[in-house]
Image (cartoon, rainbow, N blue to C red):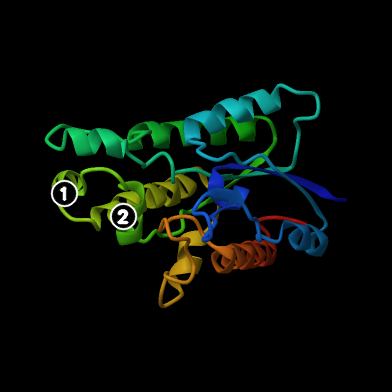
């Protein structure tokens, strides 16, 4: 029997890339969902949205569950990339102030727990994903274009805090998965197996390019095979 899977997340699984010709974001999704569907007899629907956070994800999932056709067998969730981001304009203007991320880590964790509980209560298996790593230097130069970079750097202390801060959200996802006995697709680990991230990310240092998206495809395939072997899922 064909299993229905839905995806809720941000631009990562939406397949957003930075067009190298005009330096604008566009959908160029090379994550081979069709092949994954055929190989494992799945029906996958992608509800990912550019800029989505875990709190927006909760609202979208609650709305989806309220519909007559909302039921599915599993929901894959990819949140954290936007949650951990900051208002860089505000940072550049007031580098001596405290600046919170879009979703503070405690709120991020609590909201993810709420979603997982909600899905399990509705008979839907939650599946989480870790965050692919970013290139801090590229991220800094891209997202701080036109800003006072010296002020931003003053607030950061060092540019690599961007990487460490994003990593803290990915580690939080791992902890949430362990605490709730939830399946986890380790996208971050798949990227870190490669010697260099330079050829896997767009010029903004955060969105996977076509080569990076192929790694995501492979990570999902390996996750499914491993979960089947362990009996964690039956497809």
Residue 7 horizontal/vertical position (percent): 65, 44
Name the image quarter holding residue 164. Answer: bottom left
Q: Quadrant of the C terminus?
A: bottom right
Question: Does the rendering let one see residue 137?
Answer: yes
Q: Residue at x 47, y 72 (%)?
A: 199
Q: Residue at x 69, y 28 (%)?
A: 64
Name the image quarter holding residue 97. Answer: top left
The residue wearing badge 2 is 141
59 with respect to 87 (left or right): right
Task: Tell me the distance, in whole angstroms, between the alpha carbons under discs 2 and 1.
Answer: 11 Å
Q: Residue at x 11, y 35 (%)?
A: 96
Secondary structure of residue under mark 1: helix
The numbered disc on residue 44 is: none
Residue 207 horizontal/vertical position (percent): 49, 55
Question: Does the rendering let one see residue 182?
Answer: no
Whether 232 is drawn above or below 10: the answer is: below
Q: Nearer the viewer, residue 180 or 129?
A: 129
Secondary structure of residue under mark 2: helix
194 with respect to 138 (left or right): right
The residue wearing badge 1 is 150
Q: Nearer the viewer, residue 22 or 56?
A: 22
CA neighbours of label 2 inside 10 A, class few (<14), some (14 to 19), many (20+): some
Going by the picture, which residue comes out furthest to the front? Answer: 22
Whether 155 is drawn above or below 164: the answer is: above
130 with respect to 68 (left or right): left
Nearest to N terminus: mark 2 or mark 1: 2
Residue 70 horizontal/vertical position (percent): 75, 30
């Amino acid at each position: 029997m064909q299993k229905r899977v839905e995806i809720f997340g941000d631009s990562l699984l939406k397949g957003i890339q930075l067009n190298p010709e005009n330096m604008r974001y566009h959908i160029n999704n090379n994550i081979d969902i069709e092949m994954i569907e055929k190989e494992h007899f799945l029906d996958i629907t992608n509800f990912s949205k550019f800029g989505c956070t875990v709190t927006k994800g909760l609202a979208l999932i609650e709305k989806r569950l309220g519909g007559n056709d909302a039921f599915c067998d599993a929901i894959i969730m990819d949140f954290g990339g936007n949650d951990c981001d900051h208002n860089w304009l505000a940072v550049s203007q007031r580098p001596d102030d405290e600046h919170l991320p879009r979703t503070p880590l405690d709120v991020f964790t609590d909201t993810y727990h709420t979603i997982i509980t909600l899905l399990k209560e509705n008979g839907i298996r939650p599946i989480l994903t870790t965050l692919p790593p970013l290139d801090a230097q590229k991220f800094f130069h891209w997202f701080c274009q036109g800003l006072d970079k010296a002020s931003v750097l003053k607030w950061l202390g060092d540019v690599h805090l961007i990487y460490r801060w994003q990593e803290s959200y990915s580690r939080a996802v791992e902890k949430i998965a362990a605490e709730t006995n939830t399946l986890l697709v380790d996208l971050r680990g798949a990227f870190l197996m490669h010697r260099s991230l330079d050829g896997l990310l767009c010029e903004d240092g955060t969105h996977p390019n076509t080569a990076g998206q192929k790694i995501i495809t492979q990570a999902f395939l390996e996750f499914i095979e491993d979960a089947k072997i362990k009996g964690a899922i039956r497809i």
